[in-house]
Image (tube, rainbow, N blue to C red):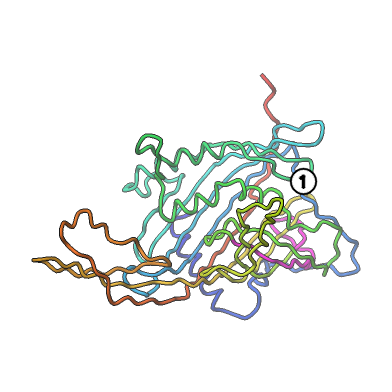
Amino acid sequence: MKPTLLYIALAALTSMAAGCKKSPSSHYGKDEPIRGSRADPAVAMQASWSPSNRYHFQIQSITAAEEPRRNTTDLVTRETSFGEEFALAITNVAADGSRIMELEIQGLQIDSALGERVTINFDSGNESLDMNSRPVTERLQKLIGSRLAVHLTPENRVRRVDGLKEINDSLTERVATNSTRKVVRGAAGNILSRFFTQQFWREMLEMSALPTNEVRVGDTWTVTRPLTMSPGGNLTADLTYTFKGWQQHDERRCARLEFSGTVRPQTPVPRIRGGPGNPAPPPLTSPQPGAEIGSINGVTWFSPDLALPVETIFDQTTTSKITTARRVRVVSGTNTSTTMSSTITVNPPPSMDSTNLGSLAVATTNESVQTVTATTKQHISLKLVEVTPYAPAPPK
């Protein structure tokens, strides 16, 4: 990923969002005709990982998120891009069909800017970038070559992912006895916290959006799935998929699956467990204050020859309500008077610590609360770049 990709892609993303009324998915891959009819035989689309192949993927996420500017209700855009190259291969197959898949991280790129201020510009293939953040870039560079062990059931369900703790530990540092803090913070830290989780790899590897039955051209099906890659976090997508027909994509004959739907907050689950005479309360169904809602549109190309999707592209737009409060604080004493103001988000800050003020008294006046609507646009692509022969190393 080139450093300028962030700005080029965000310009395309913005123009698409402001453009025509058709679903964005209708624009993807229109360079090749879509063929097929309802009369064609039904086909199955079940994902399968071959033990004789190594699969090389690239994922790119580009996000433009509005957030309040400090001490005002004006919005500023935080632009962030994330790229990762990784390879997958089956290393062990048990008699019951369960497998262990090795996942190797081969490349990483992170760019972020708040307004016109670049906060990080990292590319594992270009060490000359972002020399002013060497403690951060050195930690990120160490992620290259990291390996995860993904345990899959015979039905291609992820049981667990080994190695995530070691990756996350490498991004922290010890600051006191039994205390650590993140080395990579801010937008970059938020990105890594979404993409290096078991839930993210579960969503990507299980491919649960594929139809469970044989389908014909024109058939539709619905899928509800979490959105780990969303910057809002804890979101759910309710999607409708349509088998549009057959299309050449990256020199492969693929089934074109278009999807669209809505994005909503995940339903909160109460932590209180029921018991005899104390049944658990029903799940909450109404969105929480400030929760994000939005829409999503995209395309998946599924290759029957590989028994895998070779690329998925989608665009997501969400909006959220952000409450800001502006307070003017007057600190007065016998011989001094100081006025301070601050803007806070959602929850008011704790009272000023009076331990260092001596005989000063603290008063808060002129409080105003405003709610603004912020928009987040995200473009994501997951592409199978290459398939190479693979043979696991013989046991020592």
Q: Is residue 52 above or below residue 232?
A: above
Taking the image as shown, residue 9 lies to the left or right of residue 184, namely: right
Taking the image as shown, residue 322 lies to the left or right of residue 366, namely: right
Farthest left residue in view: 335
- Position of the C terminus, as image quadrant, is top right
Taking the image as shown, residue 12 lies to the left or right of residue 303, namely: left
On the image, the x and y values in percent for residue 106 come to 54, 41
Tell me the chief SS of the magenta region.
Answer: strand
Q: Amino acid at mark 1?
A: Ser
Q: Quadrant of residue 370?
A: bottom left
Say few, some or many: other residues with alpha carbon within 10 Å of mark 1 (under 14 / 14 to 19 / 20 or more): some
On the image, the x and y values in percent for residue 346 come to 43, 67
Q: Which residue is mark 1?
A: 48
Residue 12 visible at all: no
- The answer to which of 271 and 243 lies nearer the viewer is 271
Please name the residue shown 42% across and 41% down the image.
172
Please name the residue shown 71% across and 56% down the image.
251
Instruction: Please check the rendered image and state whether residue 254 is part of the magenta-colored stretch, yes or no.
Output: yes
Instruction: Please check the rendered image and state whether residue 332 is part of the magenta-colored stretch, yes or no.
Output: no
- The answer to which of 227 and 12 lies nearer the viewer is 227
Please name the residue shown 80% across and 58% down the image.
211
Stretch of the chain drawn in magenta: 235-256
Taking the image as shown, residue 224 lies to the left or right of residue 379, namely: right
Please name the residue shown 47% across and 38% down the image.
169
On the image, the x and y values in percent for residue 91 come to 69, 33
On the image, the x and y values in percent for residue 174 come to 38, 37
Label 1 element class: loop
Residue 188 visible at all: yes
